[in-house]
Image: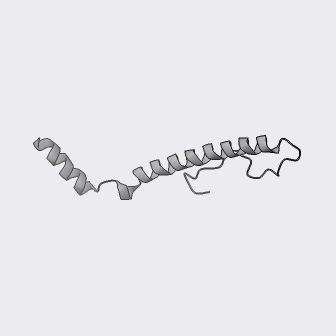
Amino acid sequence: MPEGAIVEPAGSGTDDPPCPGGDYLVTDVARLRQRAVFLRELAQARALLARTHPSHVPSPAVRERLRLDADQR
């Protein structure tokens, strides 16, 4: 697994077989809710990673220019 990869939490229900009986709807709703939480957290982690990725961070020359601009104020 690559470094920083996010693993789906155990018991998320993706590998569970469908529940037999009349209570399957409640179980499915709970599984869907848990899956939604996982996907939301995954999206937040990806957004955080994108913000800190080197392609989104100013180069040393740009940081120096920003520092000089701040000093002149």
Residue 55 visible here: yes
- The picture quadrant where one finds residue 70 is top left
- For the C terminus, the image quarter is top left
Q: Nearer the viewer, residue 43 or 64?
A: 43
Q: Residue furthest left?
A: 72
Q: Residue furthest right?
A: 21
The total number of labels drawn is: 0
Q: Residue at x 66, y 47 (%)?
A: 35
Return the x and y of residue 37 as percentages of the image width and height: 61, 43
Q: Residue furthest bottom?
A: 55
Is residue 37 found left or right of 70 in the rendered image? right
Q: Nearer the viewer, residue 54 or 24?
A: 24
Return the x and y of residue 1 as percentages of the image width and height: 62, 57
Q: Nearer the viewer, residue 56 or 21?
A: 21
Return the x and y of residue 22 as percentages of the image width and height: 87, 43
Residue 11 visible here: no
Q: Residue at x 69, y 46 (%)?
A: 32
Return the x and y of residue 26 as percentages of the image width and height: 77, 40
Q: Residue at x 54, y 51 (%)?
A: 4
